[in-house]
Image (tube, rainbow, N blue to C red):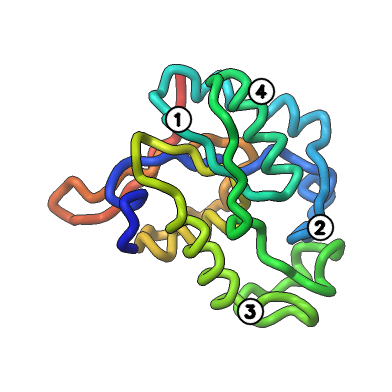
């Protein structure tokens, strides 16, 4: 990716938990809200991100991401910039159904094909200026697009709700991006 954002470290945060997450249902572009656990997670993530030098916060337009970003923004005293291209994949008729009913490689009826979703997401990410270290607040689908685009081998487990991560550009002999969890 040729954007300045992807030549320097940046932070990524998946939104806090929703009832869809808790119940194992596909939310996609359905605009679900954070549940109480999600709000607690967002507040805890904000504290973990305090003092990290984050210069700007960019969020998906979906409420679960905007609200998570808002919790962080309140602590970091930064505005949230909504980037429409960061919305989760449109899963069409699969939304609201159990996660096991989705097939990532296939176009869901009435939804987005994987390549369309990836292109839209990458365009959204490319619109983020690379000045300072930004925080991107989005979705598990956004995370998978990032991993694929930066040639990072996906971990065995999916990205957890509200677990702040720092993406670090190639710096070692292997020339690969790495991901570091943000801890105290």
SS of the residue under disc 2: loop
Q: Which residue is mark 2?
A: 30
Alpha-carbon span between mark 4 and mark 1:
14 Å
Name which of mark 4 and mark 3 comes first in the sequence.
Answer: 4
Alpha-carbon span between mark 2 and mark 3:
17 Å
Please tell me which residue lies in front, 167 or 158.
Answer: 167
Please tell me which residue lies in front, 85 or 108.
Answer: 85
Q: At 28% across and 50% down in the image, what residue appears? A: 7
Name which of mark 2 and mark 4 comes first in the sequence.
Answer: 2
Above or below, 75 relative to 166? above
Alpha-carbon span between mark 4 and mark 3:
34 Å
Q: Which residue is mark 4?
A: 43
Image quadrant in which the N terminus is located: bottom left
Q: Which residue is mark 1?
A: 182
The image quadrant of residue 66 is top right
SS of the residue under disc 3: loop
Mark linked to residue 134 = none
Residue 6: percent from left, percent from top: 34, 52
Please tell me which residue lies in front, 165 or 54.
Answer: 54
In the displayed structure image, the side of residue 21 where residue 114 appears, left or right: left
**Is disc 2 surrounded by few (<14), some (14 to 19) or many (20+) residues within 10 Å?**
some
Name which of mark 2 and mark 1 comes first in the sequence.
Answer: 2
In the displayed structure image, the side of residue 142 where residue 5 appears, left or right: left
SS of the residue under disc 4: helix
Residue 108: percent from left, percent from top: 74, 79
Q: Which residue is mark 3?
A: 113
SS of the residue under disc 1: loop
Name which of mark 2 and mark 3 comes first in the sequence.
Answer: 2
State yes or no: discs 2 and 3 in contact (Cβ < 8 Å).
no
Task: Tell us which disc is closer to us: 4 or 1.
Answer: 4
């Amino acid at each position: 990716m040729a954007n300045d954002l992807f030549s320097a470290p940046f932070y990524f945060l998946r939104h806090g938990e929703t009832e869809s997450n808790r119940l194992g249902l596909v939310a996609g572009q359905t605009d679900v809200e954070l549940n109480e656990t999600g709000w607690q997670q967002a507040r805890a993530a904000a504290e973990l991100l305090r003092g990290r030098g984050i210069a700007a916060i960019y969020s998906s337009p979906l409420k679960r991401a905007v609200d998570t970003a808002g919790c962080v923004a309140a602590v970091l005293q930064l505005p949230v910039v909504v980037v429409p291209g960061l919305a989760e994949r449109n899963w069409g008729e699969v939304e609201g159904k159990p996660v096991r009913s989705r097939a990532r490689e296939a176009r869901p009826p009435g939804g987005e094909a994987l390549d369309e979703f990836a292109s839209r997401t990458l365009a959204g990410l490319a619109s983020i200026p690379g000045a300072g270290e930004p925080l991107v607040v989005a979705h598990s689908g956004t995370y998978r697009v990032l991993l694929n685009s930066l040639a990072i081998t996906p971990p065995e487990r999916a990205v957890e709700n509200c677990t702040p991560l720092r993406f670090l550009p190639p710096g070692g002999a292997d020339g690969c991006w790495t991901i570091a969890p943000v801890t105290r």
